[in-house]
Image (cartoon, grey):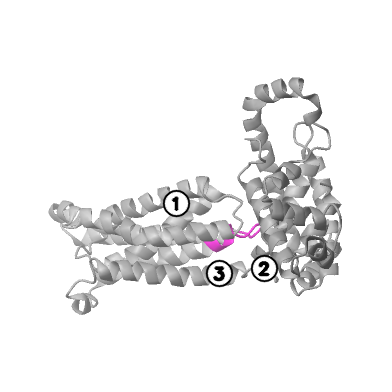
Amino acid sequence: MRTDDLIKALDADASSKAMPLRSAWWMAAGAAVVIAAAVFLLTIGPRPDFMAAAHTMRFLSKFVFTIVLAVSAFALIRALSTPGASTGRAMAWMAAAPMLVAVAVLLELFMVPEALWGTRMVGNNMMICMGFIPLIGIGPLAIFLWMLRYGAPTRPVLAGAVAGLLAGGLAATFYAAHCFDDSPLFVATWYTIAIAALALLGALGGRFFVRW
Amino acid sequence: MSGKDEAELSRLMRAAIAGDEKAYADFLHRIAALVRGFVRRKIVQGGVDPEDVVQETLLAIHVKRHTWRQDAPVLPWIYAIARFKLIDAFRRRGRRIEIDVDDIAETFAEPETETVSERDINRALDSLSPAQRSVVSAVSVEGRSIGETAAKFGISETAVRVSLHRGLAAIAKRFGQGRFGRE
């Protein structure tokens, strides 16, 4: 087939419509939140003293970390799924959540006696944390990978990893409402491992599933 | 590549999205020329046929045109897709080298199967369902309009549009997976 012939076919198909990628991303984000919320509420749910805990800095700080991670990953993944879009600024923002966690860890180390560092870090829920963050995040990750297929990421593996970070940030936001371990030492260790697992899964998905 | 190109191509693309078919044809012809120049400069040694990459890029631009933001410049978007498809073609060639032994054996047995004008897109076209293939061929190679194609096969124009759209999407998908019907 000559290229001119191909152009005739493409032109004849000009009237076919697809939802603009930007709107599709917002719909996908909405669907992912609904799915994550449903899995969360049907399984572990928020902790009973949620309202009381909401007055403590440590409890609230968890949401700052996870929401900052989710928001920055959402901005980056939208840029990564658009060919030719600049990603530098969004990439730089990805450092925000880890930096906030690092600062919180330092503060915690100053405020808590050294003898308690170990117990704070190990906490009581590390297995639940490492199980439920991926469990809540797996549905959203599937949606985000599907969205990457709908888009056109020129770096699919990186985009897939960011999809995992986004799903992880979202899942951890819900999980944080359940977990009694509020110390930044716990969050920096176990949340990171659970979210990294989702990022790895996302990178694999990007490699083998996101083709266009 | 110039600011004038950018402004003109963005204008054509916006008109095309708004439903102006003539603007879209104009847009695609200009892009084909731009991408052809880009790809020929990048492919210095043989093995990858520049025109295959041009065709893959045009198809990708078509099926992914919803990823272009109308307030963003169009040239960086086009070149990012072209570069991606070019790298893909090189990578595929690397993979093909491993199976080339079989290819050569086949070529010796049936020399007429491999011709210079044989395009990846033809192999992708062959993999479509008969209905989609005949509609895509009628509109492209035979140059018929949607209406003429509908009359030729005795089906509705809507059915022609659906077959054409699905056929093109299927070809683009095969390209994305690096399959052209002979693996």
- Secondary structure of the residue carrying numbered label 3: helix
Q: Which residues are magenta?
A: A77-86
Residue A21 x, y percent position in the rendering:
60, 67
Please give left or right for residue A81 compared with residue B121 in the image: left
Separation of marks 1 and 3 at Cα, in angstroms: 19 Å
Separation of marks 3 and 2 at Cα, in angstroms: 13 Å
Callout 3 crowding tier (Cα within 10 Å): few <14, some 14–19, many ≥20? some
Q: Is residue A46 magenta?
A: no
Q: Which residue is mark 3?
A: A24
Residue A47 x, y percent position in the rendering:
20, 71
Of the numbered discs in the image, which one, if any, rests on residue A202? 1
Q: Which residue is mark 2?
A: B69
At label 1, the amino acid type is Gly
Q: Nearer the viewer, residue A68 or B182?
A: B182
Label 3 marks which chain's residue? A
At label 3, the amino acid type is Ala
**Is B143 rendered above or below residue B122?**
below
Which residue corresponds to the image point at 84% horizontal and 52% vertical from the top-left? B141
Residue B124 x, y percent position in the rendering:
70, 45
Label 2 marks which chain's residue? B
Residue B75 x, y percent position in the rendering:
76, 59
Label 1 marks which chain's residue? A
State the residue lying farthest toward the left: A115
Q: Are labels 2 and 1 on one chain? A: no
